[in-house]
Amino acid sequence: MSKLVIEPSPHIKSGVTTQKIMLSVIIALLPALFASVWIFGLRALIMVVICCTSCVIFEWACRKIMKRSNTISDLSAVVTGMLLAFNLPVTLPFYMAIIGCFVAIVIVKQFFGGIGQNFANPAITGRIVLMLSFTSYMTTWAEPFYYRNAGEIVTTSTPLVSETPVSLSDLFLGTTGGCIGETCALALLIGGIFLVAIRVISPVTPLCFIGTVFVLSIFSTGSLEGALMSVLSGGLLLGAIFMATDYATTPITTKGRIIFGIGCGLVTMLIRSFGSMPEGVSYSILLMNILSPLIDRFTVPKAFGAVSEQKGGKK
Amino acid sequence: MSNWKEFTKGLIKENPNMVMLLGMCPTLAITTMAANGVGMGLSTTFVLVCSNIVISLLKKVIPDTVRLPAYIVIVAGFVTFVSLMLQAFAPDIYSSLGMYLSLITVNCIILGRAEMFASKNKVIPSIMDGLGMGLGFTLTLVLVGSVREIFGSGQWFGITIMPDFMEPMTLFILPAGGFFVLGVVIAVVNRLMKKKPREIGCHNCPNAEGCPGACDKANSNGGEQ
């Protein structure tokens, strides 16, 4: 008699794999990559390539040393590398970017057990470590199209702290100072809509995040235009679309995602308005990452067909 | 146990910092520079040896019910002595250690050794124990301090050693860097001592019921980045 094997559900498998999800995220990041090369020149592309390569190498070496199965083929390291590079200013020395990749992959991801086990977003943490370590390098932004002026780097300030007002169209097209991938709102939105359309990310978190920032900025700036500028400037769109939707480090229920998004927006606005730093998106996402397990615990959905205990007791 | 063993156990095997995880407050707070680690470590060693001697001598006199206040008074006396001496002869170290010098009084390594060792043993073993524990503490402080100073400010005992093209990483001098370096040092020591990490295994797993036993497979699915 053959042994009857009982396996837990689910029994129907969908064709979605980590690799496919990561590939679609990479595709969604491509418009922003093209925009950044257009705005900041070839060095932006080199930075992205260096970050991706070093992330993959660190991941491979780390899994090898820890004697674990190798996971570089799931492309998650490439996504981390791209996101980290997008969060760096184009003028940053390359070795600093590699240190950031080391922090992201080895310390944040592999020390905690690899993909799906990390408690915080690797790219965000890598950026924050670089920000705390090399503050002056991380807050030097190149003027857009600086590469056309015979290679001389002119620095400018990010729209968040700049004194001369930046036009909305400049912000939308990304021709302002900032990190490599965060400036071009149009490209980021295209990527975000693509990810929502193929159902890789749910639109709940980004909408709540951006919506909270928008509503709060109406109050803080007193005008619709000011609120729009506050949404389009800084790393808000990049963070909300690509980092606050990370599967491993954000809540899994819709209710939880709403809390997560609003929390991110709130912390971002608090840091932007009252903090000593100009930008708070990365810190807000990191803080809410840490809260995610708690949010998940308080938003456990009711199982389908389940009756709450009190009602069941009365019958 | 021979006196020599009492001395060596504190260095690595029962190192108060890296193995017993006592005295974390000064370890994290003052290790931004290796020199601070030496100053703090040696002051603590001195206080530890002296208090061990006195407590070991007085172990029959001190009533059991008030032993902790009695220990603290003895320790505080020596701490006052050390801080006045440092203020007079090494004002640099005195100012860089700041209030952490007086906080040696409530350092749990000293109280721990008094409670666990000196109050139960004779004078000579207590001296050796105090010396070993103190030097073990100093060793950790200098180790953590060196790592943080080299990476955080590019110097070692005040001598610049980092090449010009590298920027020191400020993170290492910040408190977060202290926690991080200490964690890594403890992990490395545990690894070198071949301590096995706690196995979680299937019998402790909350999802063991109805799990086909393919945890690896489950882990590799899902999770962006």
Image (cartoon, rainbow, N blue to C red):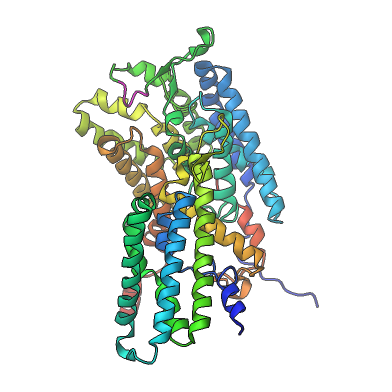
Is the residue B24 above or below the residue A23 in the image?
below
The residue segment tinted magenta is A158-162
Left or right: residue B222 versus residue B171 is right
Residue drawn where x is 71% and y is 71% of the image: A5
Please name whichever residue, A123 or A172, is drawn nearer the observer in this view of the structure: A123
In the image, is residue A156 above or below residue B156?
above
- Where residue B60 appears, as percent x and y from the top left, is 38, 92
Residue B38 spot, x, y in % from top left = 48, 56
Is any part of residue A252 visible from this angle?
no
Q: Is residue A309 magenta?
A: no
The residue drawn where x is 44% and y is 37% is A131
- Rendered view: B22 above or below A132: below
Q: How many callouts does the rendering have? A: 0
Q: Percent from the top left, x then y, of residue A31?
A: 53, 24
**Quarter of the rendering containing residue A213:** top left
Chief SS of the magenta region: loop
Q: Where is residue B210 in the image (x, y as percent from the top left)?
A: 60, 71
Q: Observer-nearest residue: A6 or A21?
A: A21
Q: Taking B60 as reference, is B95 above or below it?
A: above
In this view of the protein, which residue sits in the foreground, B73 or A81?
Answer: B73
Residue at the (53%, 7%) spot, across then down: A150
Residue B1 visible in image: yes
From the viewer's perspective, is A163 left or right of B202? left
Specify whether A187 is left or right of B98.
right
Q: Quadrant of residue A236?
A: top left
- Quarter of the image for the N terminus of chain A: give it: bottom right
Instruction: Name the residue at 39% across, 59% down.
Output: A294
